């Protein structure tokens, strides 16, 4: 048999992050500290907006012909008076005020205001918005979408960290549910850590030049802040400055991107992407996974395609090492798990030879992702005594040579990675080694992604099943009795069997 020519080689090439998707509204944050804000009207809406604006440091004038008892009580003792300011944040927050004015608003009241809020209805609301527009100031009309020029979002308060959530008025309850999720993730102590960061900025600037070393210090600070349950002490921050000042060498992290579904990324993988200076990624890593990276990070495609154009492994190693030696934090982003058919040893060896620190962040390998999607227990005790992952091609791209009797063992579940093009060549050897032609099998492409497709078949029917799948997508072939149990237990979840 004549060997196929080697696939053409292409160099690593830089790519751009995706463009910003359309926004329903522009999220902005007004600095209202010490500024005058006008609120017109009374009732719960006016009181709540006055309290919110005062909490942001504004001096709020509330124009209401008959100020309510609740408004008067707020003016006498609103939440940020005295001891109610969280300890350690006094210098970070400005205390605002609320002053009721017992009359209706007038156009002259709007002159010089930073913004205006109307708790009004009907023609009165439209007149107020029109007057604010003539005065050239932003205006919100409570519970009246489309009349004002800005809206208030749902707020998560970890001052000085403030998170605003907007559904553009489409689903306020959904916004509240999102706020609850974020509240549960962010401990109240986070605000004190953010305030401490403000105090540290000048010290950090004096010690570390702008670049990788300074960014790494803030990354480690953020890691501590996001897991802390109490406010920081001096002892908590001492280790941040352990790294040598002016260190020039970067680092490399091999990160598993999982089988394709971005929700299957680990938290550690997300943190690595968010701290990367450079992301070197495989062809099969989707754009939605790359979106977890810093927008400022360089993106370099080092795609490998089975049987198609590929980057030389030596070129990938050289670029990765060179960037890290420049002081960059390089994330080598691989589909699945870096340690499963990912050439991790070659890349780690190149880094160590250059004296670079290298770390591995595991990912969900394609076999377990596909099994979860199919509802397939790879090690069902009634059908499998052993699980094995094997590669479907050798270094020359052809079918590899194996101890075929081990793969033909009827009590083994075998997962072939990258075997779509070569299984037809392996099949006669498997059958000759004793594999039953009717052994249950499944071929699945693009597992865990919206493009996922699979065919349940037999060992003899695998070549035909693979031919019915998208050849541009990664393909797994799973062989063994466990596949038959899956097909029998959940027939509604699998595609029609192709006769072998």
Image: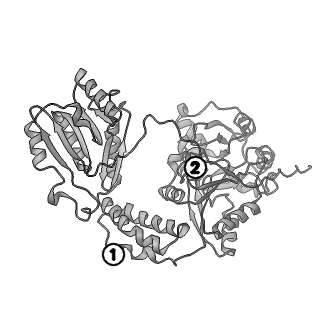
Asked whether 256 or 435 is in front, the reply is: 256
Q: How is the image coloured?
A: one colour
Hey, which residue is sitting farthest right in the picture?
2
Residue 379 on image: x %, y %: 56, 52
The crowd level at tag 1 (other Cα within 10 Å; few <14, some 14-19, many 20+) is few
Left of 181 or right of it: where is 389?
Answer: right
User: Residue 61 vs residue 159: left or right?
Assistant: left
**CB under 8 Å between discs 2 and 1:** no
Q: Position of residue 288 (x, y in %)?
A: 56, 44
Q: Identify the residue shown where x is 32% and y is 69%.
A: 232
Q: Nearer the viewer, residue 418 or 155?
A: 155
Figure check: 69 above or below 312: above
Q: Return the mark for residue 32.
A: none
Q: Position of residue 126 (x, y in %)?
A: 28, 24
User: Which residue does the numbered mark 2 point to in the structure image?
Assistant: 290
Q: Which of the 4 image quadrants contains residue 337? A: bottom right
Element type at marker 2? helix
Mark 2: few/some/many CA within 10 Å (<14, 14-19, 20+)? many
Q: Residue 458 falls in which quadrant of the image?
A: top right
For the point 44% across and 34% down, the residue is: 24
Please tell me which residue lies in front, 440 or 92: 92
The kind of secondary structure element at disc 1 is: helix
Q: CA distance from mark 2 to mark 1?
A: 36 Å
Q: Does 5 sit left or right of 85 as displayed?
A: right
Q: Is residue 125 above or below residue 475?
A: above
| Residue 121 in view here | yes
Q: Position of residue 208 (x, y in %)?
A: 50, 72
Residue 45 seen in render: no
Q: Which mark is residue 234?
A: 1
Comes first in the chain, label 2 or label 1 = 1
| 202 in relation to 103, above or below | below
């Amino acid at each position: 048999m004549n060997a196929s020519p080697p696939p053409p080689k292409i160099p690593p090439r830089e790519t751009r992050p995706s463009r910003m998707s359309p926004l329903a509204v522009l999220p902005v944050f007004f600095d209202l500290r010490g500024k005058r804000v006008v609120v017109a009207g009374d009732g719960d809406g006016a009181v709540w907006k006055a309290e919110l604006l005062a909490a942001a440091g504004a001096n709020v004038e509330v124009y209401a012909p008959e100020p309510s008892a609740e408004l008067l009580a707020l003016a006498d003792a609103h939440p940020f008076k005295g001891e109610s300011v969280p300890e350690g944040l006094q210098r970070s927050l400005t205390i605002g005020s609320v002053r009721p004015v017992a009359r209706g608003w007038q156009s002259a009241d709007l002159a010089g205001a930073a913004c205006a809020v109307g708790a009004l209805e009907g023609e009165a609301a439209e007149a107020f918005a029109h007057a604010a527009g003539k005065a050239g100031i932003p205006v919100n009309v409570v519970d009246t979408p489309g009349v004002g020029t800005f809206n208030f979002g749902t707020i998560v308060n970890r001052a000085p960290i403030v998170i605003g959530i907007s559904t553009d008025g489409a689903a306020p309850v959904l916004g509240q549910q999102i706020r609850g999720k974020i509240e549960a993730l962010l401990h109240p102590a986070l605000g004190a850590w953010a305030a401490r960061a403000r105090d540290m900025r000048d010290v950090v600037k004096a010690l570390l030049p702008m670049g990788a070393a300074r960014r790494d210090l803030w990354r480690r600070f953020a890691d501590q802040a996001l897991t802390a349950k109490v406010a920081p002490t001096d002892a908590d921050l001492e280790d941040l400055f352990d790294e040598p000042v002016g260190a020039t060498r970067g680092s490399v992290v091999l990160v598993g991107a999982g089988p394709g579904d971005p929700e299957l990324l680990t938290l550690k993988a997300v943190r690595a992407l968010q701290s990367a200076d450079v992301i070197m990624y495989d062809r099969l890593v989707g754009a939605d996974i790359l979106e977890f990276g810093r927008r400022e990070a360089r993106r370099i495609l080092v795609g490998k395609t089975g049987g198609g154009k590929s980057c030389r492994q030596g070129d990938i190693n050289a670029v990765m090492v060179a960037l890290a030696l420049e002081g960059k934090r390089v994330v080598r982003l691989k589909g699945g798990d870096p340690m499963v058919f990912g050439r991790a040893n070659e890349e780690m060896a190149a880094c160590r030879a250059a004296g670079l620190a290298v770390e591995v962040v595991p990912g969900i390998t394609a076999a377990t992702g596909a099994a979860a999607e199919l509802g397939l227990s790879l090690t069902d005790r009634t059908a499998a005594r052993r699980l094995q992952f094997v590669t479907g091609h050798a270094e020359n791209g052809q079918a590899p040579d194996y101890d075929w009797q081990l793969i033909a063992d009827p009590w083994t579940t075998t997962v072939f990675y990258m075997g779509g093009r070569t299984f037809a060549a392996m099949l006669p050897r498997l059958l000759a080694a004793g594999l039953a032609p009717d052994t249950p099998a499944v071929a699945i492409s693009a597992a865990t992604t919206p493009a996922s497709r699979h065919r349940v078949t037999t060992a003899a029917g695998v070549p035909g099943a693979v031919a019915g799948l998208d050849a541009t997508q990664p393909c797994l072939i799973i062989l063994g009795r466990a596949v038959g149990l899956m097909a029998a237990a959940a027939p509604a979840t699998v595609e029609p069997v192709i006769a072998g």
